[in-house]
Image: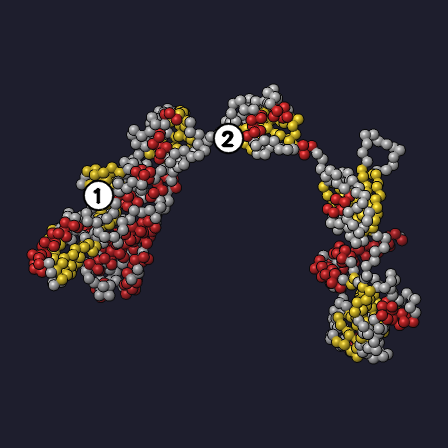
Amino acid sequence: MRKLITVIVLFVALFQSSSLMAQDILKGNDLSTVRVDYLSDGDIAKIKSQLQSNNVTIDQAESMVLSKGMSATEFAKLKKRLALPETAKASTDKKLIKKTAKDSDSEDQEDDSEDAVRKQEKIENKKIKDDSNSLVFGSELFDNPTLNFQPNLKLATPVNYVLGPGDELQISVNGVQEFSDNVPVSAEGNVNIQYVGQISVSGMTIEAATQKIKGAISRVYSTVRSGQSMVTVSLSRIRTIKVTIIGSKQPGNYSISSLGTVYNALFLGGGPSKNGSYRNIELIRNNKVFRNIDIYHFLVKGDQSDNVGLRDNDVIRIPAYTNRVTVEGEVKRPGIFEMKKGEHFSDLLNFASGFNEFAYTASVNVLQKTGKELKVADIHAAQYGSYLPLNGDVFRVTKILNRFENRIVINGAVFRPDTYSFHQGMLVSELIKQAEGLKEDAYLKRARIIRLKEDLTTEIVNVDLGKAMSGDFNADLALKKEDVVTVYSILDFKEEYKVTIDGEVKKPDVYDYQENLTLNDLIVAAGGLTGSASKRVEIARMIKAENIDDTNPNKVELFNVEISPESNEQAINFELKPFDVVNIRRLAVVEKPEMVTVSGSVSYPGKYVLANKKEKIYDVIQRAGGLTSLASLNGVKVKRPIKKEQIENLENINLNLGKKDSIQNKLKKKFKEDLKYATIPVDWEKVARNQNGSANITLQPGDEIEVSAFNETVKVSGNVLLTSEIPYRSGRGFNHYIDAVGGIDGKGWRNKAYVIYPNGEAAVTKHFLFFRSSPKVEPGSQIIVPEKPETKKMTTGEWVSIGSVITSLALLIVTAFK
């Protein structure tokens, strides 16, 4: 415990010694206990000001400070902190901006107006919005840093500006004699002009002081009296004045420019406090109330007559409010407002910018506070100018009702269906005339009125519209407010009829049915007949009957009509009925020329038309001039296009690859690319020997016949060490070519190697017991060695499981035999 007390005492002594050192570094006797790290930014600022007041730099004071016991390390720290710029000392800024009256009187005289402006800007940057007081009308004025009422020091000095100690005048004489000097106004209120002497200007306006100085100079400078020289007097530096603010959010003493105003000072003080008045602020000058300031004049009217200039030692006192009320609801500016004695509710509405467009203006509900409890009262519009709001009143402005006092609606078969104004005694015919009358398709037998009863339920009232419009007083019913009148259209009662046309027309589809629609009309609407249309037309019509006829087995009635395919206009114009289905039949024989393609080693490659329905490959090749001398007899094949729907069906093939979706997708993609054509190998030697044999295949439209040139090499690819083409050698087998490319790599599957011959036919390696038969290799062939499938090796646990199962089965068998 004693050790703890000792440490505390030493720390306090060290702090006090540091503070004493900060007070006057030049007068201290023992600086050995000073610790620069414990000095605040304010202490450093005081040391700097002391050095400046004695015209001594820190380097000049080094020997004196070290002789008084400060270590070289601490001196180096002190020198470094003194060298820091002012902007790096945030805590010092507050103390320089806001000073107490006890220790700042002499320093304020030395500050100029530009310093005060900089301090002002620091205060503005540090402002924090007071959300707790944000509903009070006028509080936003002091939370906005862009609205600071700061005076513009770059403008010309006002002629009514009153001089005082701290101002500085620039006095110039120009002409035959010349003189220029910046002369400060002393604490006694005098300016000392060289060769002229002291002149008292304190309390004088700048205009009066200028005349006095000119008169004094003219007595010394003769050329000024004669007019040969001119005297000019201007304000080169504006003094800083001291004002005190009481009752603000940040009360205290403030140093501001002598051009500062009341609003400028209020802004620096953060505006009125939570309970401060906005309408009865007192400006006290020479211990008397000089002016009462009402900020509402500025807020409501923009009137700055209360924004008067300040004098040195002015006091701004913000008393507590007397009467505050709250306005809620449908006003343009809801909030908390301060009321003066004698102001009415109409004045309060003016402060709130009046009712908004949704407000119920006939009366306002007010919640009052009595001595014991709450009380509710209603203020009617006639009382707005006489009701005096009481402290704590809460005014609630409600919305207008979401209903209409004179609405009536008409819709349907009128030219202007809409909402109209209702008046007492309004008739159905009158409303229809207001809606520009009935449309041609209006149903005159009946109109419907949906009427709202007094209990807010609805009822339907029917109107004979034909009689009402013809002047029948009994049928022309009187309407009521909120009636909804519906005028029906005869088109609403008609079924939507359709007819269908299919077959040999250009646009087979379902079309709308109209009365008197004929077969010719429908054919023209469908774009006319195609070139393959026959003269036979079948028309199916639905059967309608009241009773079921069991003797008639027909579901529809059929009509067979003959037309002229060469013309869309028929001699017999068949009239159609709703829901008829028309079928234009196709000619029995319509054969358009269809072609195949021949390419490769033939005399005349190109496209050839199939001359008959069973055109053979031999016939087409002969028409192409036959095979050339370079053609390979084993290199004839037919590529037949696969239909689009067959290619799309490949996407639905499951290759049973389990979870290997990426491999499956790649294989499907390759199949789709490779299977755009189906390859049909052709044994040309058999075809040449027997044109009637099955080897002479029948061609189909779109087939491509490819005749390869003779190739003396054999290509080896796939999972081999080197993909290459090896010269063909008669008598050499499959293994010769595999060995010629270095053999099979580690992933190659020799047992599944296969050969693709020039005509597209393939042969695989065959196995029987332990014997393997490799396929025959011919010139132009391609040997492909596929990749072995990946196999999952069994883990030790799986082997143990299998062993356990086998052991269990063996025991069961032994037990069964026993």
* Discs 1, 2 touching: Cβ within 8 Å: no
Image spot of residue 769 (x, y percent)? 88, 67
Mark nearer the viewer, 1 or 2:
2
Does 470 sit left or right of 684 as displayed? left
Q: Nearer the viewer, residue 704 or 578?
A: 578
Check disc 2 and report its element: helix, strand or loop.
loop
Q: CA distance from mark 1 to mark 2?
A: 57 Å
Q: Which badge, 1 or 2, is on the more N-terminal residue?
A: 1
Q: How many marks?
A: 2
Q: Which residue is mark 1?
A: 314
Q: Nearer the viewer, residue 47 or 706?
A: 706
Check disc 1 and report its element: helix, strand or loop.
strand
Q: Which residue is mark 2?
A: 402
Does 74 sit left or right of 550 as displayed? left
The residue sitting at 16% across, 48% down in the picture is 205
User: Please, is residue 554 above or below residue 613 in the view?
Assistant: above
